Each structure stands twice: as C-alpha cells, then as structure tokens.
Image: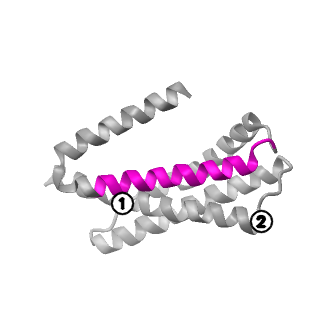
Amino acid sequence: MVLTNKGREWAKAQLEVAKTKYSDVSEQLDEFAAELQGIREMATGVVQDLDGKLDWEKFVDALFEELKSVVRSIETEFELPLPDDMDERTRLREEKIKRVLDQAIDAFFRVLEEQGIIEDNDEMRSKVDAIKKVCLHVFMVASGSLASFSHHLIC
C-alpha cells in the first residue's frame, strides 16, 4: 500500500509539473486525471464484488496470459501506417481501441468462468461496460494527444 501511495503522490506531482509547463491545457489535464480516478473507483467496486470469491494470484496470472494473447492478436495492426486523413485516423483508432477493450473484457469474464466464478451477470456486465466507456474516452484523448504531439515533432 505504501508503494501505491508513493506512486499516486508521484503521479500527482508530475501532473502539477505538466499543468505548469503546459498551462494552456491545464484544465484538460485535470479532467483527464479525474477520469482516471473514476476508472480506479469503478474498478475498485468490481474488485470488492469479487473479493473472497477467488484466488487473486491465480486470477491475475490467468488474466495476464489471456491478455498476452489479446496483445499478440492486434500487435501487427498497430504497426500498420495510419491514413493521412485525420478524421479517418481517429475513426480507425477508436475502432482498434474498442476491439482491444472488448477482447480484454471477454478475457476477464472467461477467466472468471474458468476460475469457477460466474459473474457475467447484468450487474457485473454493467459495471465493466461503464469502465470500458470511460477507458475508451481516456484512451482516445491520450492517443489523440500523442498523435498531435508527434505531429508537432515531425513538422
């Protein structure tokens, strides 16, 4: 827990540095940080729902193996060149991110089922879908920002 708190403190300090350095996007950085905090809170709720129902070490190991397969399945796609049209790039990025999130969620529920925990019910699905929605937005903002930043470096 101490390491986690230190990590959080470091991240907050880095956010403040970034807000000072890039004051023109300070408000967006605060919104981004708030969305990340929201994801953390929602994920904590899912963990609490599952706590005591499974062996976390086995679950994490199995999920990690499943997610490695997800990454391998899309790895080459992300190496392909993006179209020149920025709207098409955004659409393509969103499509890929959605696909990865869907595959990760499928892996999550598959591992739960393999571990004998049948939690793919409406309530759990609703919680995970809410996390997915915020993650999609966060990843789109981050990938768009990275794309803009790298464009400035190239120009």
The front one of 118 and 103 is: 118
Q: Which residues are magenta?
A: 28-52
Percent position of residue 22, x then y:
18, 48
Number of callouts in the render?
Answer: 2
The residue that disc 2 covers is 121
Instruction: Identify the residue at horizontal 29%, vertical 58% (top origin).
Output: 28
The front one of 108 and 96 is: 108
The residue that disc 1 covers is 141
In this rendering, the label closer to the viewer, 2 or 1: 2
Is there any visible trace of residue 33 in the rendered image?
Answer: yes
Residue 37 higher or lower than 124, as above or below: above
Instruction: Give the colour scheme shown.
Output: one colour
Instruction: Identify the residue at horizontal 67%, vertical 52% (top origin).
Output: 46
Amino acid at circle 2: Asn
Q: Quadrant of the N terminus?
A: top right
Regarding mark 1 in the picture, which secondary structure is present there? helix
Percent position of residue 143, x then y:
36, 57
Q: Looking at the rendering, which quadrant does residue 123 occupy?
A: bottom right
22 relative position to 98: left or right: left
Percent position of residue 16, x then y:
27, 41
Q: Which mark is residue 27?
A: none
The front one of 148 and 26 is: 26
Percent position of residue 102, x then y:
60, 63
Instruction: Identify the residue at horizontal 18%, vertical 43% (top origin).
Output: 20
Residue 106 higher or lower than 18, as above or below: below
In the rendered image, residue 43 lying in the magenta stretch gets the answer: yes
The front one of 17 and 87 is: 17
Amino acid at circle 1: Val
